[in-house]
Image (spheres, grey):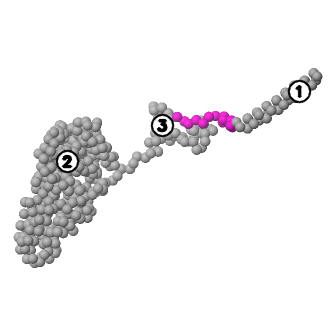
Amino acid sequence: MEYVILAVVIAVVVLGAATGLVVNGRRRKQLPPAPPAQPQITKPAPAATAEPTAEPQVGEDAAVTAPEQSPTAPEVELPGEAAEAVEAPALEVPEPTAGRLTRLRSRLSRSQNSLGKGLLTLLSRDRLDEETWEEIEELLLTADVGVQPTQELVERLRTRVKVLGTRTPEELRNLLREELITLIDPSLDRTLHVARHDDETPARPAVLLVVGVNGVGKTTTSGKLARVLVADGHTVVLGAADTFRAAAADQLQTWGERVGARTVRGPEAGDPASVAFDAVKEGIAEGADTVLVDTAGRLHTKTGLMDELGKVKRVVEKHGPVDEVLLVLDATTGQNGLVQAKVFAEVVDITGIVLTKLDGTAKGGIVISVQRQLGVPVKLIGLGEGADDLAPFDPAAFVDALLG
C-alpha cells in the first residue's frame, strides 16, 4: 500500500513539472523582443548661451551619442541651424517709375471711351451746331471736369475750330490734346519732395504724411508709395500711425517687408502722433532718406478726428517741417471727393493729390477739377490693384491715354 501511494506522488510531481515546462515555453514565445543595449536618444538643443558651430553636423553627432538610433529618426535643429536652413525671403525689386503711366495707359479705357473718344466723335461731326456744343459741354460735366473748366474748354474749342476751318481727324486730335493739357496745367510742380536734408545736423529725412478718409485705399496706397520711393533709389522708414485698426499696421508692415523698409508701429488704439514722432526719430537714427507716415482714415465730418490729424502734423514738425502731405482720393467718388479735399486742406496744408481707382471710372475729368478747387497738383494716380500700379502723374501721357 505504501508503494502505491509513493508511485502516485511521483507521477503527480512528474506531470506538474512537464506542464510547467510547456506553459513557460508558451510564455517565452509571447514575450516581446528584448530592448536594445542603449535607448534611442534625441539630442537636446544646447543652452541659449552656447555658441553654435559654423558648420554643425547633426547627423554625425547623433550617430556618436546614440548608435542604435534609427536612420529615419527626426533630427533636432539647433539654434543657428534654423536661421541657416530657412533662407530669408528675397526682397522684391519694384518696377522703375519712369514710363509707368505709359505702360498703364490701357487701364484708362473707361475714362478714354467717355471723355477722349467721346469728344473726338462729337468734334468730328460735319456740322457743329449749338446742339452739338451742348452735348460736348454735357460730356465734360459728366466726366467731372467741373463747371468753370468746362466753360473755358468749350469756348477755346469753338474759337479754334472756327479758325481751323476744315477739320481732319488728326487736326482735331492735336487741337483737343493741346487744350486738355493746358486745362490740366503742366506748369504745376508735381515733384515728390523726398530727399534727405543733408544740410541739417543731424541729417533729417524727408517726411511724407498720407491722409484721407476711410475706404479710399489709403494704407494700400502708402505701401505702393513706399515701393515707388524704393524703386527710385530711396531708403524708407514707414510709420503705422493708423493705430485704430490693427490690420492697417499689419498691412503696412507687410508692404514694407517686401521691399526692405522698416515699419515703426505702436500699441493698438495708441496715440497716432506718438507713433509718427517715433517714426521720424527712427528715420533720423537710421539715416533714411524718407519717412512715410500712414495716418488713420478719417471722416471729414468728424471735427475731433480732423483736429487729431492736425496734432499729428504739429508733433511731427518738432523734428522739422513736413515735406509732403498727400491726400488720397477715390476717383470714383467724383464731386464728393472734392468736398473731402476742401476739408482736409483746411486742417493740414495739402501739397499733392493721389487719385486712386482711376482705372475704374469714367470720371477722368476729376484730375482737372480737383486741381482747380485746391490749387494743388495731382502727383500720383492709381491704375490697378497690382503692387506697381501707382504711377507719377504726367499730364501729356495722361491726355494721350485719354485720346487713345
Q: Is residue 204 magenta?
A: no
The answer to which image quadrant residue 319 occupies is top left
Secondary structure under tag 3 reads loop
Q: Which residues are magenta?
A: 32-44
Residue of label 1: 8
Q: Secondary structure at mark 2?
A: loop
In this rendering, position of residue 232 left or right of residue 367: right
Q: Amino acid at mark 2?
A: Gly
Mark 1 and mark 2 lie on one chain; the one further toward the N terminus is 1
The mark closer to the camera, 1 or 3, is 1
Question: How packed is label 1: few (under 14 Cα within 10 Å), some, or many (20 or more)?
Answer: few
Q: Secondary structure at mark 1?
A: helix
Classify the position of the N terminus by image quarter.
Answer: top right
Which residue lies at the image location 70% right of the left edge and 36% below the top edge? 31
Q: Earlier in the sequence, mark 2 or mark 3?
A: 3
Q: Which mark's residue is nearer the viewer, 2 or 3?
A: 2
